[in-house]
Amino acid sequence: MIEIRDARKSFGSHTVLDGINLSIARNDIFGLIGVSGAGKSTLLRCLNRLEELDSGQIIVDGVDIGGLRKAELLEFRRSIGMVFQQFSLLERKSVYDNVYFPLKCTGAKRQRVDSRIKDILDLVGLGDKMHALPRELSGGQKQRVAIARALVSEPSILLSDEATSALDPNITESVLGLLRRINRELGLTIVVVTHEVSVMKAVCTRMGLLNHGQLQALGTSEEFFLERPELLTEFTRDAGWLPNVSSDEALLRVVLRGDRDASLISELAIRTGVRFEVSWGGLDRYGESVAGSFVLKAPRPQLGEITRGLEALGAQWREV
């Protein structure tokens, strides 16, 4: 649905995007993670041409958006909703009027879109707040208004730029749950920009790591967190942590998916009779699924017994 080809962008002598190539499938929740200044927000803003590329292409549903003329670009932008960290609500307008505002700007009459607005407010859990003013809302409720405003034009793509960064963890989880529901019920393609690994883990099916304007890595969220956590050490303290080992010891990263759970570790010990140490790991939720990884410290002479036991139990592993 979205294809980015050799995207390049500079501000003066500073290169922000340096040859980005990326495809995002329809109905995907794709996450871009990176430190401040990595180019995440710039790339996101290029997707609806709020920023223009210096060179390269962005193709959406087979259309090169760089070639759109003014009227075509305005129509294209109606197919893309955007949610920012700052809510940017009209403080003297009700929740209903804030959501109606983008439709009003296109000349839509209130009575013709009334049911659509109410349906969207129900979807985001604010049906009983439509007459409230922004000052009467919590931070999470304000962000839900911003999401409703982005959805009311019935877009096919939703862009989220650090939308949960200003919210506390409990409110963040509720907003992320809403994004999952929107993706599931409305079939939207969602692109999420964040520096928070918890956001990636909770909602994203696929993700990319941006570093100094380049796409350093690409994969599913499970692949990042379970198989390549060392890539995320800048964002979480224990993502790539590994214990020290001697020359006669080995470290194995064991990945559990599907119906496998932590009891596999006990089964492995019973099956092999080898004494090993679980140095790090656990189960977690990745979008709609549960998976996990463990780091095992084992005697190197008995490594073969351990790996054969893991394979027999249906676990993935690699030496680290």
Image (tube, helix red, strand yellow):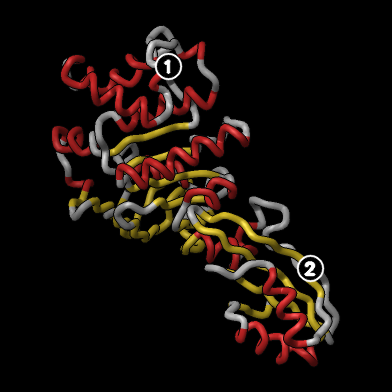
In the visual, does 148 lie left or right of 73?
right
Give me the disc on residue 68: none
Q: Residue at x 71, y 63 (%)?
A: 281
Question: Which residue type carries mark 1?
Answer: Lys
Q: CA distance from mark 1 to mark 2?
A: 49 Å
Residue at the extreme top of the image, as rendered: 92
Q: Pick the quarter of the image with the C terminus.
A: bottom right
In percent of width and height, residue 305 lies at 72, 91
**Image quadrant occupied by the N terminus:** bottom left
Q: Which of the pair 2/158 is nearer the observer?
A: 158
Horizontal side of residue 166 vs 304, given as left or right: left
Residue identifier under label 2: 279
From the viewer's perspective, tell me whether residue 50 is left or right of residue 303: left
Within-10-Å neighbours for mark 1: few <14, some 14–19, many 20+: some
Residue at 75% x, 65% y: name it: 280
Does any portion of residue 107 appear in the rendered image?
no
For image coordinates 76% across by 82% down, the residue present is: 270
Q: Nearer the viewer, residue 23 or 38?
A: 23
Measuring from the top left, give residue 239's x and y in whole percent. Answer: 67, 59
- Secondary structure type for disc 1: helix
**Percent from the top left, x then y, of residue 76?**
20, 39
Callout 2 amino acid = Ser
Is residue 301 among what the camera can see? yes
Percent x, y for residue 289? 51, 58
Q: Nearer the viewer, mark 1 or mark 2?
A: 1
Q: Report which residue position mark 1 lands on.
A: 129
